[in-house]
Amino acid sequence: MLTLKLLREDPEYVIRKLAVKHFDAREIVTRINELDGNRRALQTELDACLARQNRIASQIGALMKEGKKEEAEAVKKEVSALKEQSKALEEKSQTNNSELNSLIVLLPNIPCDLVPEGKNSDDNVVVRTGNEIPELGPDALPHWELARNLDIIDFDLGVKLTGAGFPVYKGKGARLQRALINFFLDVNTRAGYLEVEPPVMINEASGFGTGQLPDKEGQMYHATLDNYYLVPTAEVPVTNIYRDVILGNDDFPVKMTAYTPCFRREAGSYGKDVRGLNRLHQFDKVEIVRIEKPENSYAALDDMIAHVEGIVKSLGLPYRILRLCGGDLSFTSAITYDFEVYSAAQGRWLEISSVSNFESYQANRLKLRYRDADGKMQLAHTLNGSSLALPRVVAALLEDNQKDGHIVIPEILRPYTGFDVI
RNA sequence: GGUGAGAUGGGUGAGUGGCUGAAACCAGCAGUUUGCUAAACUGCCGUACGGGAUUACCGUACCGGGGGUUCGAAUCCCCCUCUCACCGCCA
């Protein structure tokens, strides 16, 4: 959520920057500023009215104490007109403010200056690539066939138990999942991220805090009996740890990492995009979350990118890092870098991580603030990134490391898997 | 699932209609004292919004959330949410 202060002080800046996201904000911003003007005028008026009532009330109290009943009764009559007036003002400002609130959440976050122009994913900018794309030859199989042949991932069994998009990992496949999760968590904690294990269901307030609610309600599984949502990402419970928190100036940086299964309804997805592990309703992911002072958040972002890159590099998977263009940037993000690995048998790049700076956009919703060196209250900046999401890592791992129908496990994972080959 | 108790500032916790934005203590901050530490003493010590000469200062709201009674509500009434304890069930 953008702040009213910014919208009031520099509406043209907001409009200009949101155009990078292909969002035409002029009408909304203009209306918001009208409503904000009304809000302030109405409050000034209402406050004055209430102040008079308060003064009279305490006068009555004093008169009653002195036993001057008639005088008190006389003064009481004055109040009723004031009460009506304040009631009317209150209704007016309520109507006004609820329109204001419903409009301000429609504005996406402002992209930062580094965000390139562009309409869609074709316009994303490749900032770096690494590791070699393997030459697999004509017999290379896609991961869903490898997984079936080796009996390590059973998609049909998942359909029986739950439905499409809920695979069952078996044997070395299950062990590989566990190995990857532990490996990622270890690397993250070594880099100073505090490991947390949060609930995988969240309440409405948490969903609102990080922006999943109300906009993306349809993307989450909803346990209606208790009104809980299954987490679409660990970002939600972990960032919400700091909802309604006021940090001290010396409490930074806050670095956390968490493994959770993630649940996404992915309504509207179909076709080859969802084949095999490419897109699932339940998948495993290790997330990193940071809370930073504004002046440090971009250095923190670079640090997170380098961190994630180190992990991908150590797995030996061919990767590239993209800076998302304005048109491809998510609603809440100020800047996002996507990590993709090359799926050799499918001949396509698969997104395995998304590292973003939300600046104060989430913090404003979360009421996540800190007291700066001067003791002034400021909004903190929030950042997060996948480190990493498992399914597509596994897909690439299987495909890129296949040899004679078997999979060669990368060196770095072997202490975790306990085997070299599947 | 049953029964009971409760929700007050960073924490503990007082407060059953006006003198309470809220005692006291703890924590925190600043200062005095002190060879250092400790102790003692003094002062400060919630948030949001609005006004404003934009440090000051003033106003309003907020004691889980919403509504009501009243000139006046943390306090009385109604609804909701959540927490805790005990019983039942249970990994």
Image (spheres, grey):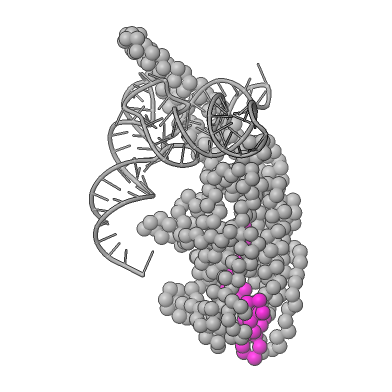
Q: Residue furthest bottom?
A: A404
The answer to which image quadrant residue A141 occupies is bottom right
Question: Is A170 in the magenta?
Answer: no
| Vertical placement of residue A92 versus A160, above or below | above
The stretch of residues the image draws in magenta is A384-413
Residue A130 is situated, as x and y percent measured from the top left of the image, at 75, 72
| Vertical placement of residue A270 versus A135, above or below | above
Residue A286: tell me if it is visible: yes
Task: Classify residue A396 as left or right of residue A164.
Answer: right
Question: Is A406 in the magenta?
Answer: yes
Please name the residue shown 61% across and 56% down the image. Answer: A255
Please name the residue shown 69% across and 56% down the image. Answer: A301
Residue A276: tell me if it is visible: no
The answer to which image quadrant residue B37 occupies is top right
The answer to which image quadrant residue A65 occupies is top left
Q: Quarter holding the C terminus of chain A?
A: bottom right
Residue A351 is situated, as x and y percent measured from the top left of the image, at 64, 68
Task: Classify residue A342 as left or right of residue A263.
Answer: right
Please name the residue shown 56% across and 67% down the image. Answer: A285
| Vertical placement of residue A283 versus A28, above or below | below
Task: Classify residue A198 as left or right of residue B12.
Answer: right
Please name the residue shown 51% across and 61% down the image. Answer: A197
| Vertical placement of residue A140 versus A324, above or below | below
Q: Nearer the viewer, residue A220 or A414?
A: A414
Residue A45 is situated, as x and y percent measured from the top left of the image, at 52, 23
Q: How many marks?
A: 0
